[in-house]
Amino acid sequence: MARHKLGRDSSRVMLRERRLQRGLLSALGLVLAACQGEAPPSGGKGGSNGTAPSASSGTSTVGGVGGGSSAGSSPVVAGGSQGGSVNGGSSSGGVASAVGGGSASGAAGASTTGGAGSSASGAGGSSGSGGAAGGQAGSAGANGGGSGGTANVPMCKGTPTTLKDAGACSDRLIGTAIAANHLNDSSYTTTAKEFNYATPENEMKWDSIEPSQGNFNFAPGDQVVNFAKSNGMKVKGHTLVWRYSVPSWVSNIGSADALRSAMVNHITQVMNHYKAGGTVVAWDVVNEAWENDGTKFWDTPFSSKLGMGFVDDAFKAARAADANAKLYYNDYRADGMNAKANAIYNMVKGMVERGVPIDGVGLQVHTGTPNAPSTPDDILQNMQRIAALGLEIVISEMDVHVCDGLTAQQQKQYYHDVVAACVKVPKCTAITFWGASDKYSWVKDFNETNCAGKNPSACLWDDNWMKKSAYDGVMDALVGK
Ligand code: XIL
């Protein structure tokens, strides 16, 4: 039975969790310590950015365990100090309300009490009606049964047998990346039924969807959306502005004004195309803008010609195109409390303060060299402070490869603990895994890991579509175990 043990001794559980985390993190750290700050995990194009600074961004290496540098260094931990303390909230009856009482900014307050759906930023007022992706915090409050909006206690109706049903115990959407070119594999499409949220893996990236200026190729993206729709899944569009998958015509635009117009037109046309269907409920508007040390943006046509203001411009164009879609900033290696996460926190805080329409932050959680693991406590703390701004958090692309020496048990534990962190934060509304099966995992082709000659085994299903113990870890976390 998937019953949450309301009466459990939370301090004992916390101790046990800490012990497990320590073990896991030290195992993860065997190889990772030296790997900080390498090239980004994106797109496999590596490129010159690999020079990103080392030590700094990596606060969360192994040493990060005790919080050490990382936790302490965070500039603004609003969440922790507001209302429900990071872990502490969870004492009585396990009804944590990590953010619950706390949502610092007035705007967010609504989110925990059910109803409205809380279009956090206040800026967009995107109504919270945003379909499945929206409004979840509110309904979770109902589940939690508490007027205080304790959305972080999963309450299952019956025993869930799929990830999406387990996610429904706390109203989280459970997602996977979907690639159009695998939709002819029946194992792929059958396994996809475990999920109720899809992110097109590549089909909506700029070079795929607008390969030459003004010529849009929606067919592959439509395939993913149609598949999702016919399987009862919502979709998060991915991604409107990124430094990879940028066609050369964009890079070659000379003037700032022309580039801004091209960007706004791209966002407008793509979002217009998909909003009509009602399946695409959210977008990664800007992906991976920050360098790994959090000191500045990557050098891209957007940052170099438009300055950092391109992010505001992109979100404003997105809101103008679709008033109801959830709009996210998405990045990697910024899930825990580290310099890059701080930079992102400060950026989105500024956006909220300026009234720029942003609804949330995506934490990718690609884990394993070159991305050192963040402690689940750090991830929780980061989620808390983002939630305290009134923003949602989504785990957007999680996978955990084992090439650093992780055992299956440790992998399971890490998956469990990160998912459990999301479940503790009412405004963490969705958890997406970057593919279901190892068979098609991008990690196999991503050349910045240390997986040469090894199977990354990063996903919840193995190469033969058998569920791994990591799957059980996720299920447990989703039902509150
Ligand atoms: C990856 C895809 O999975 C690969 O198929 C593709 O070759 C490169 O991009 N961060 C992101 C995703 O935001 O879009 C990336 O997806 C993985 C890292």
Image (spheres, rainbow, N blue to C red):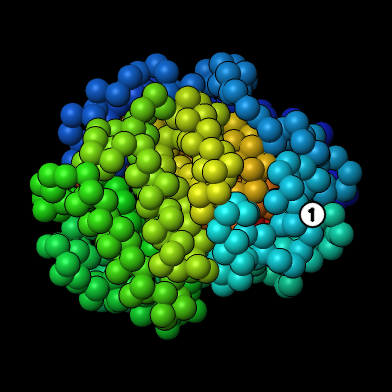
Assess disc 1: are there few (<14), some (14-19) or many (≥20) residues with their C-alpha within 10 Å of its C-alpha: many
Comparing 214 with 5, the one in front is: 214
Residue 27 shows in the view? no
Give coordinates of residue 399: x percent, y percent. Answer: 42, 47
Residue topped by disc 1: 150
Give coordinates of residue 327: x percent, y percent. Answer: 48, 57
Residue at figure coordinates x 46%, y 78% from the top left: 278
Residue at figure coordinates x 53%, y 38% from the top left: 350
For the image, the number of numbered tags is 1
Residue at figure coordinates x 64%, y 37% from the top left: 385
Residue at figure coordinates x 29%, y 48% from the top left: 242
Q: Which image quadrant: the N terminus?
A: bottom right
Q: Is residue 265 left or right of residue 247?
A: right
Where residue 113 sits, quadrant-wise, is bottom right
Where residue 354 sits, quadrant-wise, is top right
Q: Is residue 263 left or right of residue 237?
A: left
Give coordinates of residue 120: x percent, y percent. Answer: 63, 54
Give coordinates of residue 81: x percent, y percent. Answer: 75, 31
User: In the rendered view, would you say 438 is above or below 446?
Assistant: below
Residue type, mark 1 in image: Thr
SS for tag 1?
loop
User: In the rendered view, would you say 123 is above or below 73?
Assistant: below
User: In the rendered view, would you say 240 is above or below 308?
Assistant: below
User: In the rendered view, would you say 460 is above or below 127?
Assistant: above
Q: Is mark 1 within 8 Å of ligand 1?
A: no
Question: In the current view of this chain or complex, which residue is farthest to the front?
Answer: 257
Comparing 125 with 340, the one in front is: 125
Comparing 323 with 177, the one in front is: 323
Residue 208 shows in the view? yes
Q: Is residue 277 left or right of residue 248?
A: right
Where residue 463 sits, quadrant-wise, is bottom left
